Amino acid sequence: MSYCTIDDVRNQVEEARLVQLTDDEGTGAVVESRVLQAISDADEEINGYLGTRTAVPVLPVPESLRRLSADIAVYNLYSRREKVPEHRIERYRNAVRFLEQAALGKISLGPADPEGNPVESQPEAAADNPQRAFTRSTLSGF
């Protein structure tokens, strides 16, 4: 199961541009197999990051992963054909930064996150705290 669909990609790229990015044969139509391959590659990249933290694929698919998968898939489509527009590069970089932070447990994937939002560095209260060094009686002469 993919994190996003062809329709998610179509929502980000106008049809004429999608034809340009996928139609190597010159048929004038979107070659869906190339879009599906770009989605598959995006999902593998996502799984590579998140696989260090949780079982993949992540099901049910969190909304954040659907959006990231579409962003990465569009980037993949552009990169196979022509110079990637700057805004697509920035969206890809943002997706990677999000995935890096999610893999570390610093960002939650949202309500559907299977692991919640684990943060390993939270302080813990200890029952065996040392005696206070400064009290009213030890500071009485100052």
Image (spheres, rainbow, N blue to C red):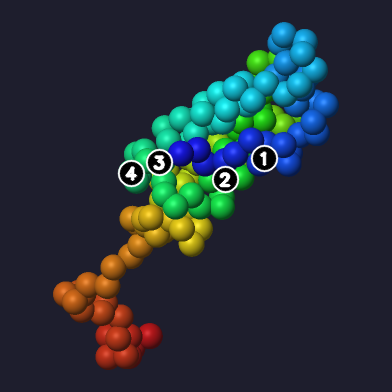
> What is the distance, in whole Å, between disc 4 and disc 2 at their CAs?
17 Å
Residue carrying label 1: 7
Of the residues shown, which amino acid type is indicated by label 4?
Answer: Ala
Disc 3 to disc 4, C-alpha distance: 6 Å
Pick the residue in front: 18 or 119. Answer: 18
Question: Looking at the image, can residue 111 be seen?
Answer: yes
Q: Nearer the viewer, mark 3 or mark 1?
A: 1
Q: Whole-Å distance between the Cαs marked 3 and 1?
A: 20 Å
Dot 3: few (<14), some (14–19), or many (≥20) neighbours within 10 Å? some
Q: Which residue is mark 2?
A: 66
Q: Residue 11 placed where, x, y %?
A: 73, 41
Q: Earlier in the sequence, mark 1 or mark 2?
A: 1
- Sequence order check, earlier mark of 3 and 1: 1
Q: Give the CA distance from mark 1 to mark 4.
A: 26 Å
Q: Nearer the viewer, mark 1 or mark 4?
A: 1
Q: Residue at 64% x, 25% y: name it.
A: 32
Residue drawn where x is 49% and y is 34% of the image: 43
Is disc 4 in contact with disc 2, using a CB cutoff of under 8 Å? Answer: no
Q: Nearer the viewer, residue 30 or 72?
A: 30
Residue at 38 percent across and 55 percent down: it is 114
Residue tagged by mark 3?
A: 57
Q: Mark 4 highlights which residue?
A: 55
Could you tell me which residue is drawn at 53 percent across and 45 percent down?
65
* Few, some or many residues within 10 Å of mark 2 (<14, 14–19, 20+): some
